[in-house]
Image: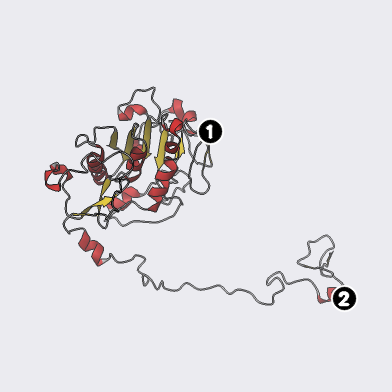
Amino acid sequence: MQRFVPLTGSLTDNAPGYNIVSEDVAEAALGPLCWKCSGTGSVTKKVSLVECKVCNGRKRLPVKSDVQKAKTTPGMITRQTLPPGWEPKGPRCFYGSTPADELPSDLSLQDGEQMCVFVGDWRIIQRKGGHRWTTDDIVTGWVAGKLSRDSAASASVKHTLDLGCGNGSVLLMVAWQYPEARCFGMEARSEAVGLARRSIKYNVGGGPDGSCRVKVINQDFRTLIPKEDLLDDCIEGVSNLSMSKNDAHAILPEEFGLPASSKFDLVTGTPPYFQVDFEVTKSSPRAKTAILSAKVGGSEDTNETNPATAVVSPLEEPTAGHAAAPGVTVEKAII
């Protein structure tokens, strides 16, 4: 390989290009490759911005008429056709065999609600046209249930916690896979908390506030009092997070009525998996609440989705599964 420097330049200057000399050294007389087109003879022209053909430049898609109508239709129950002799796995639904007209009043479906098939013979109450459980919940629930398929490890799971549990989809999946564990969820949106508590009561039993082995508290974990002395334990092994002592919050067992010596053996958090900048209208309080702008890995002038993780602690050794957003590595979490 030989480098060719223009005659107008210093011999110590970097060459703007080079030729690979093969059999014909005379090719050097052609001069160095063009730095702009890399020797192709053509360049890519910048594309000017054009109006979006999907939203026609409105930035938002219109609300589907069928979704808008579904919010005011009477509640409905989704039923499934099962093969003869099929028996559901896992713990049985508490009110599964109770006729609809004999259910407690708070379990009656309201307009726009739907009772959907879930895991085993369990059901979940969701709003039509609203936030519903999706594939990402199934993946999170499956990862969280890996220990349940190991009888020895499963017995060690006594307390679980689902952060931002929404209507309780992952929380209920975990409770179904760990029937002996006490499972807790934390959610900021009161409407989602109400749906989750009703689903818990239908499947597990308990009072209207979810006072049984599965419980949801209506609280935003960003508002918890910082515990300076627990900072190192809370973020031990967590890298690439822009977290300071002013941002660190400890979620303590006392918040859930557990002894101070207790630990959550399994902690789950549903996605978003990726950090995506987006905005919401002022008329959409549900969407605004759904945005986590705790600035963990985010910028100061944008609302970004907070990376979600599913980790196991202290049962992380020897088996642990975790899922995290790009740029976030969770090796160990102690809470």
Q: What residue do we see at 39% from left, 44% from top?
A: 141
Dividing the picture into quadrants, the one containing residue 91 is top left
| Observer-nearest of 297 and 205 | 205
Is 8 left, or right, of 126 in this rendering? Answer: right
Mark 2 closeness class: few <14, some 14–19, many ≥20 residues within 10 Å: few
Q: What residue do we see at 31% from left, 30% from top?
A: 256
Between circles 2 and 1, the one closer to the viewer is 1
Q: What residue do we see at 35% from left, 42% from top?
A: 173
Dividing the picture into quadrants, the one containing residue 43 is bottom right
Residue 222 in sight here: no
- Asked if the residue at tag 1 contacts the one at tag 2, i.e. Cβ–Cβ closer than 8 Å, the answer is no
Numbered label tally:
2
Determine whether the residue tagged by mark 1 lies in a helix, strand or loop: loop
User: Amino acid under label 1?
Assistant: Pro
Which percent across, then down, holds residue 123? 26, 47
Q: Residue furthest front?
A: 85
Image quadrant for the N terminus?
A: bottom right
Looking at marks 2 and 1 on the same chain, the residue that comes earlier in the sequence is marked by 2
Which percent across, then down, holds residue 8? 82, 69
Determine whether the residue tagged by mark 2 lies in a helix, strand or loop: helix
Q: CA distance from mark 2 to mark 1?
A: 65 Å
Dividing the picture into quadrants, the one containing residue 190 is top left
Image quadrant for the C terminus?
A: top left
Vertical order, 329 against 136 (above or below): above
User: Amino acid under label 2?
Assistant: Ala
Which percent across, then down, holds residue 155? 41, 30
Which percent across, then down, holds residue 293? 40, 46
Vertical order, 187 against 31 (above or below): above
Mark 1 closeness class: few <14, some 14–19, many ≥20 residues within 10 Å: few
Residue under pointer 1: 318
| Observer-nearest of 157 and 242 | 157
Residue 208 in sight here: yes
